Image: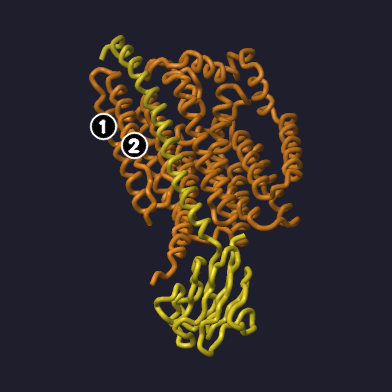
Amino acid sequence: MGRKKPSAAALLFIIMVFELSAFVLLSLRVQPIDLGAILFGVMMVGVFILQYALVNHFFPYIDRYILIIANMLAAVGLIVQYRLNPEIAFKQAGWLALGMIAMVFALLGVWKLAVWQKRRVTYILAGGGILLLALTLLMGRSAGGATSWFSVLGSTFQPSEFVKLIFVAVLAAVFAQPLQKRRLLLCFGFCGAMLGLLVLQRDLGAALLYAGTFLILLYVGTNKLSLVGLSLIGLGGGAYASYRLFDHVRVRVAIWQNPWAAYESQGYQIVQGLIALASGGLLGMGLGLGAPNVIPAYHTDFIFAVICEEFGLIFGVAMIAFYVIFIVRGALIALNAKTRFDMLLAFGCTSMITLQSFIIIGGVIKLIPLTGITLPFVSYGGSSMIVCMMLVGVLQGIAARNGQAEDEMLEQMEGNRP
Amino acid sequence: MEASAYSVLAMIMQYWFIIAILYILFRIVENAMAEYRTHRQIKKEIGKQFFGYIEIEACDVGEMQGRRYGIRKENVFGRSKRCEIAIPSAALDASHGMVVLRGKKLMLFDLSHAKGVFLNGDRIEKQAQLSDGDEIRAGNTVLRINLER
């Protein structure tokens, strides 16, 4: 089908040069030259181009720009992580590779399989999700005050990440069908259970994320502001209740309002983050010249502060812009979707990724209370990277479906020429 | 490299990094918008011509079942390969019938010699007007009209 696409060659070229130049700079940071950095840079660029070429070749209908943005963000993440500690960069590269494979699986799963909408599957998924979170609550190890990690195969595994996929799939399946009281109530119950479990696990960031995605899908799916209003009241009540019941929540709100008062203890992280942002100014201090190690969780939650300190605020705003473009592309895929389920699934995935980025960036710049979630694609974190890539895979799968359906329609337009 | 030299280099590179990422951002937006515009054009083309489609709901030729044909100005169906909707069924005449788009109206014409064309169960005389969801039977083939709203 003669669908002409503007060449992305110039774009890819600049990205390659960008990435390589950053690693070359990093290699010069020590004496003697760290050839490992250059090697790593070359490898990462190679993987990027390879993945782009392969995916583009085998799946011609996918959204290239989402792929490019995800890779770009991951590249920036890798650059900063190498700067912080080459070890974590290597690990993250491994997670990225796994993530790419997972993305392809997710893509195929959504494109080729039609099971996700079936009632039985939805119930199984919902039950599985609740079970997974409940298990984490009971068995998990505490890491940074949130009982959300447990060890599988020697590396920590964060189930609330994978449950994201389940959550989106279940909600999309529910709202794809016409409104029905019983189903809606069951759905509310499911969400309530998930949110409750997350709050109990003190994973407030995830709770906020799931709540936001739920509201978005609720509105897009049912189009009834009344339901949305009702849910908002419910969620607001839940938030207030957790504020009264849980110390952890109170602390977060307190340090959000005035981190300077608790500078030595709980407010330390936010304050250091803010200082880092300010130190960077618009142009940044220069790669490798900042002082990120004073910020707790500098390679995960606060990576945005590290990036802004060294690359500057203009760069930081550009990154935010990437996430905004992500929303637009994701929404386009959703609007081009041929079935309601596809549309809701696309909106769900887009919301998950972009809401998450806004929540953590908002927390770092003290716009909203800080929550412990990662910056998609950029932060160090295996589960986070894999799940985000899978969400992208789902979006690509839906895009593939769209493209295929449109090509089929076009073919039919040709009909049966004599 | 010495620390001071590195500092200078890093600061210079900063300008490059910022320009690069802004350029990348700009290009992504540009390219995406161009692609979107081409895509919109294609969809408009489809939309303009896409009045609806005719679906083969049932046919004694198994593999024809489920096939859909976009409705064009003239849609002749029959056994002949020259038809827009060519159905290799012995129960059909070479040119059995025709669906014609006249302005906003969709008309059905009987071109068969004796076999006849049936609209929603009733045999039509020469021509009849079609609406969304109508069922056309010719020989052992059932065609369904689906119109875009």
Tell me whether marks 2 and 1 sit on the same chain: yes
Give the crowd class for mark 2: few <14, some 14-19, many >=20 residues within 10 Å.
some
Q: Nearer the viewer, residue B117 or A257?
A: B117
Whether residue B5 is situated above or below residue B48 in the rendered picture: above
- SS of the residue at dot 2? helix
Give the crowd class for mark 1: few <14, some 14-19, many >=20 residues within 10 Å.
some
Q: Which chain is home to disc 1?
A: A
Residue projecting furthest to the bottom: B114
Q: Quadrant of the N terminus of chain A?
A: bottom left
Question: Residue B30 in the image: x percent, y percent?
Answer: 43, 36
Q: Is residue B78 visible?
A: yes
Q: Colour of chain A?
A: orange
Question: Residue A37 in the image: x percent, y percent?
Answer: 29, 28
Q: Which residue position is annotated with label 2?
A: A12
Amino acid at circle 2: Leu
Q: Is residue A44 visible?
A: no
**Residue visible at 30% across and 22% down in the picture:** A25
Q: Quadrant of the C terminus of chain A?
A: bottom left
Q: Colour of chain B?
A: yellow
Instruction: For marks 2 and 1, give the CA distance.
Output: 19 Å
Q: From the viewer's perspective, is A88 left or right of A349?
A: left
Q: Which residue position is annotated with label 1?
A: A39
Q: Nearer the viewer, residue B57 or B44?
A: B44
Question: Residue B49 in the image: x percent, y percent?
Answer: 51, 59
- SS of the residue at dot 1? helix
Amino acid at circle 1: Leu
Q: Nearer the viewer, mark 2 or mark 1?
A: 2
